[in-house]
Image: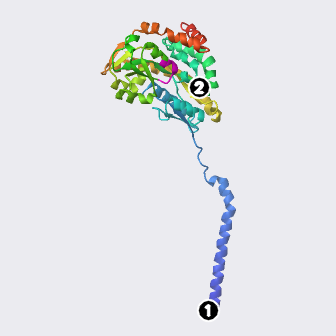
Amino acid sequence: MQERARESDHTDLSREALQARGRAVALLALLPAFLAAGCAPAPEQQEVLALSFGHVGAPGSLFALSAEEFAARVNARLEGEAEVLVYGSSQLGGDDVLLNKLRLGTVDMALPSSIMSSRIPEFGIFEMPYLVRDRRHMARIEEEVIWPVLAPLAEDHGYRILGVWENGYRHVTNNLRPVRAPEDLAGLKLRTPRGTWRVKLFQNYGANPVPMAFSEVLIALRTGVVDGQENPLAQIHASKLNEVQQYLSLTEHVYTPAYVTVSPEHWPDIPEHVRAVVEEEARVLRDFVYETARRLDRELLVTLADTEISVNWANGDAFERASQPIYDEFTTSVELGQELVDRALRVAGSE
């Protein structure tokens, strides 16, 4: 009886094992049906392409406002596909570093301005004092000078321009005296961008120009390394330069564009559809940039006049008369200099 009981237990265990095996086989047989019904693991979400955009402007500057609006427009159109990430305040380096990083492919886009004249001599056209009468004139210069002449030259030097924005009309600040005429600049240690022609310009006016990166300006002014600097109102206010300067002289000596720039070597690596959207938005943003620049010029003049800095208008006619030697040198020493000046002046009164 005991042997039969053990035999019966053994038989029951074998039956249970067989039943379990059968259930496993049945489940395996059903697996293709489950997969076909959509029970397969979900594929990983497609990674969004990040496009870095570096500039030197402080928060609230025209550079910052323009770049942020540009990124918002591009990102809305390319949501889930690509995203422009803006890095202002020289987070990715000053203009020199940014242009080098473009060529290396470690930054996707940059917004250089005056520095272009030190890389490509013909860009010195925008270092010529009082050349650009107003923004309507600048728009015509863009069509007559930048796209047909300067943009191809930039491409030859390793930079592709996607759009032309603005840095703005520049003014002088300092801690020694109001600047009303060129002779008031005599001996003034004045920070300038690292652009060849800006240095020449202020040497011609009698100042002692000190080229340095924009990120170093505030400390240089605070410590007395330089007496003053020159920038558009938007840069002066956003970077709080007025807090370490006694005098703001409205000279409007130079209008400087800014260029949305990429590398012609690395830019084609970006998907074509993404490039098309970025390039379109870079061009059409100009109207927003101009409108914002006009508003800032009006508002910041009032804002700065209400601070402790002393504001005065300079004698533009005196500065313009003193600027002729710069034009003479540019038109004789730069291969296309005379042609570029002639083109820009020809469209000054065009409608």
Foreground residue among 330 and 73: 330
| Quadrant of the image occupied by residue 32 | bottom right
> Disc 2 designates what residue?
162
**Residue at the image position 54 percent from the left and 6 percent from the top:** 349
**Residue at the image position 49 percent from the left and 24 percent from the top:** 194
In magenta stretch: residue 197: yes
Residue 123 locus on image (x, y percent): 56, 19
Tell me whether circle 1 and circle 2 mark residues in contact (CB < 8 Å): no
Q: Which mark is residue 96?
A: none
Q: Which residues are magenta?
A: 193-199
Badge 2 density bin: few <14, some 14–19, many ≥20, Cα 10 Å: some
**Residue at the image position 68 percent from the left and 70 percent from the top:** 22
| Quadrant of the image occupied by residue 342 | top right
User: Does the rendering let one see residue 76?
Assistant: no
| Quadrant of the image occupied by residue 33 | bottom right
- Mark 1 or mark 2: name the one nearer the start of the chain: 1
Residue 71 locus on image (x, y percent): 52, 31
Q: Please say which color scheme the image uses.
A: rainbow
Foreground residue among 76 and 225: 225
Q: Which mark is residue 2?
A: 1
Foreground residue among 305 and 27: 305
Q: Is residue 184 above or below residue 212?
A: above
Q: Secondary structure at mark 2?
A: strand
